[in-house]
Amino acid sequence: MITHKIINLLIALAFLAGLALPVLAATQTSDINNALNGLTNTAVDAKIINSASDTGLNSYQILGRIMYFVLGILGVIFLGIAIFAGIQWMTAGGNEEKASLAITLISRATIGLIIIIAAFLLTNYVILKAINITKPL
């Protein structure tokens, strides 16, 4: 019973962190835009790029950032579950049922982490290939 409450709390905290991060990022948008405009102007002056319109995010880059964000949140959830299961295992106090439940939770979280890492690697590969394909020569 307590296990479900703690897992629900971890999921709720991860969800709230996911909601709070865009708000925090939005407050720094004007500073970032000013810095990016300055860098773009410098690149145009140095003839590294032809015009300011050469820069900017395309749909693949936006999709990649969203996917990286989601995978990062999943990693945070894994960390919370792993810490919770480790605490459960250490505080089992000889209770075989509680210890086996904690070991099962750790093994499932590890399988989830492997899936998250595989998804990250696959996403990274696909997004980078899509960006390289769409770049002008």
Image (spheres, grey):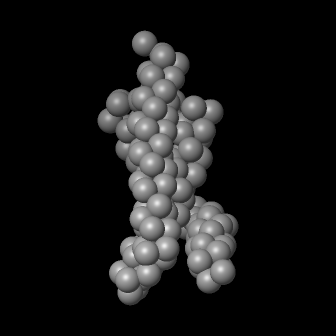
Between 30 and 46, the residue placed more toward the observer is: 30
Quadrant location of the C terminus in the rendered image: top left
At 62% from the left and 33% from the top, the residue drawn is: 59
Q: Give percent across and percent down for residue 105.
A: 49, 63
**Lateral position of residue 73 relative to residue 4, left or right:** left
Tell me how many marks there are: 0
Q: Give percent across and percent down for residue 42.
A: 38, 44
At 53% from the left and 56% from the top, the residue drawn is: 74
The quadrant in which residue 43 appears is top left
Quadrant location of the N terminus in the rendered image: bottom right
Between 82 and 57, the residue placed more toward the observer is: 82
Between 16 and 90, the residue placed more toward the observer is: 90
Direction top: furthest residue = 137
At 48% from the left and 55% from the top, the residue drawn is: 108
Q: Is residue 132 above or below residue 97?
A: above
Q: Give percent across and percent down for residue 3.
A: 59, 77
Q: Is residue 10 above or below residue 116?
A: below
The quadrant in which residue 8 appears is bottom right
The quadrant in which residue 6 appears is bottom right
Q: Give percent across and percent down for residue 20.
A: 63, 71
